[in-house]
Image (cartoon, helix red, strand yellow):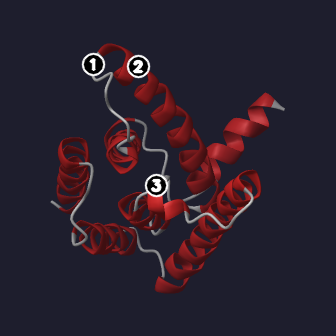
Amino acid sequence: MLKLLIIIALLLITTQDFKERMVYWFFFPFLITLLIFDRINLKESVNDIFSTSFINISFFIIQLLMVTTYFSIKNKKIVNIFAELLGWGDVFFLIAVASYLSVLNFAFYYIASLILSLLFWIFWKKLVHPSGKYIPLAGIQAVLFAMFLIFDWWLLHIDITKDDWLTSFFYKWT
């Protein structure tokens, strides 16, 4: 039941972001709560959940600072990336995801979801909605996260709260 609620929450975030280009704030604490309860159901300690969440959120904050620095240098003035470049819903969504995934899985998901979101948006703008200006990033990433969870929970059983599947995958290629 918990897993189904998580998927429904992700689909609601996607729907709202695509329709309104915004997501109601209460979805994010609700999603974080569901994701943390699922990790607790996996018999993870609260300390482990907190420490991986802290590392993931720190990584994300560093990324935000780097983007802010880049655009500030490029524009020769301090740029608030939240004014036009990134929505708060996108940030809160990634914080929710950071509360669930292991460190390597978060980095993998974060990078892959940004690349796939960009590719999807290019396709969407060309074929479906050429006048669209803003990328529904949280919505696209919510779909990708739902797919990641579905692969973990019901198809591949890779356990994305642990780094084992990623490290063994990379060791096979080296």
Q: Are marks 1 and 2 in contact (CB under 8 Å)?
A: yes
Q: Is residue 78 left or right of residue 150?
A: right
Q: Are marks 3 and 2 in contact (CB under 8 Å)?
A: no
User: In the image, residue 150 lies at what x, y percent?
Assistant: 33, 42
Q: Is residue 36 left or right of residue 54?
A: left
As drawn, which residue projects farthest toward the top?
Answer: 127
As drawn, which residue projects farthest toward the front?
Answer: 76
Of labels 1 and 3, earlier in sequence is 3
Residue at mark 1: 128
Residue at mark 2: 123
Residue at mark 3: 84
Residue 101 in sight here:
no
* Callout 2: SS: helix
Determine which quarter of the picture holds residue 9: bottom left
Is residue 21 depicted above or below 126 in this figure? below
User: Who is closer to the viewer here, 32 or 160?
Assistant: 32
User: Who is closer to the viewer here, 130 or 36?
Assistant: 130
At label 2, the amino acid type is Phe
At label 1, the amino acid type is Val
**Residue appearing at x 19%, y 50% in the figure:** 16
Please identify the quadrant where the N terminus is shown.
bottom left
Measure the alpha-carbon separation of dots 1 and 2: 8 Å
**Residue appearing at x 36%, y 73% in the figure:** 36
Disc 3: CA contacts within 10 A as few (<14), some (14-19) or many (>=20) = few
Q: What label sits on residue 115 in the rendered view?
A: none
At label 3, the amino acid type is Glu
User: In the image, residue 174 lies at what x, y percent?
Assistant: 84, 32
Measure the alpha-carbon separation of dots 1 and 3: 23 Å
Of labels 3 and 2, earlier in sequence is 3
User: In the image, residue 82 lies at what x, y percent?
Assistant: 48, 63
